[in-house]
Amino acid sequence: MAQAYDNPNLPVKPTKAREGRENQRYNSETGARIVAGCICLNETKDKTIMISSSKHKDRWIIPKGGNELDETALETAVRETWEEAGVEGIILKELPVVLDSRGNKAPIIKGDFDPDVATPKSEFHFFELQVDQLSTEWPEKSKRQRRWCTYSEAKHELIKLKRAELVDALDLSSIVRDAVDDSY
């Protein structure tokens, strides 16, 4: 994977997909689970890669996952993007941190949790990635689909899921807006 970011030692792609939450990183001040991912843009920046939820194939999200204790947020973002979407590319920039849109309603849960019961408060660290390659094989290929979406298509999918924080991350990226729709 080519690098345009300040970490030239980042591996091309992880050698092994990770599972489980025993090594998850949490913000020591807020208790929020640290999540990292990539806004994956094409070369002209007018489309982004969306992936289907592993549980709900008709729901489309941004590739992301839990930051682990032995990784930087950048390493997590690259690993999760590879595992979930099979995307490789050049990291162009780090985006500002986006906080959980549920505010104080989100529970603080440290350690293992069941996402069917409760999703912990989260803090999202996204990076903008220019896609170089879409692999034909990747760790979660059997669980997920991927597709290119325009800004308005991606925003529409995230609004349907009530994921305002992911819309915020998309808005912080350099994606070309093909429609102006600020309702959510």
Image (spheres, rainbow, N blue to C red):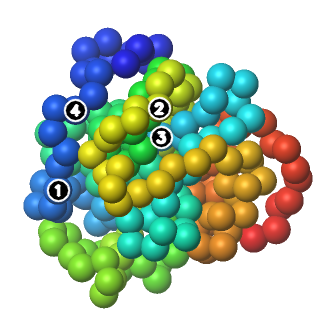
- Residue 163 position, x and y percent, is 58, 68
- Quadrant of image for the C terminus: bottom right
Mark 1 or mark 2: whose residue is earlier in sequence: 1
**Residue at point 78% right, 53% down?**
152
Q: Work out whether residue 163 or residue 153 is closer to the camera in this orientation and state it.
A: 153
Please tell me in which quadrant of the rendered image residue 114 appears: bottom left
Q: CA distance from mark 4 to mark 2?
A: 15 Å
The residue pinned by badge 2 equals 134
* Disc sitting over residue 74 in the figure: none
Identify the residue position indicated by label 3 in the image.
38
Amino acid under disc 1: Glu
| Circle nearer the N terminus (4, 1) | 4
- Disc 1 is placed on an element classified as loop
Q: CA distance from mark 3 to mark 1?
A: 19 Å
Residue 5 pos. (x, y %): 44, 18
Q: Which residue is mark 1?
A: 19
Around disc 1, counting alpha carbons within 10 Å, would you say few (fewer than 14), some (14 to 19), or many (20 or more)? Answer: few
Label 3 vs label 1, nearer the camera: 1
Amino acid carrying label 4: it is Pro
Whether residue 109 is situated above or below residue 19 in the rendered picture: below
Q: Are marks 1 and 2 in contact (CB under 8 Å)?
A: no
Numbered disc 3: secondary structure: strand
The residue where tag 4 is placed is 14
Q: Are marks 4 and 2 in contact (CB under 8 Å)?
A: no
At x 27%, y 46%, the residue is 139
Q: Nearer the viewer, residue 62 or 24?
A: 62
Question: Which amino acid is tagged 3?
Answer: Cys
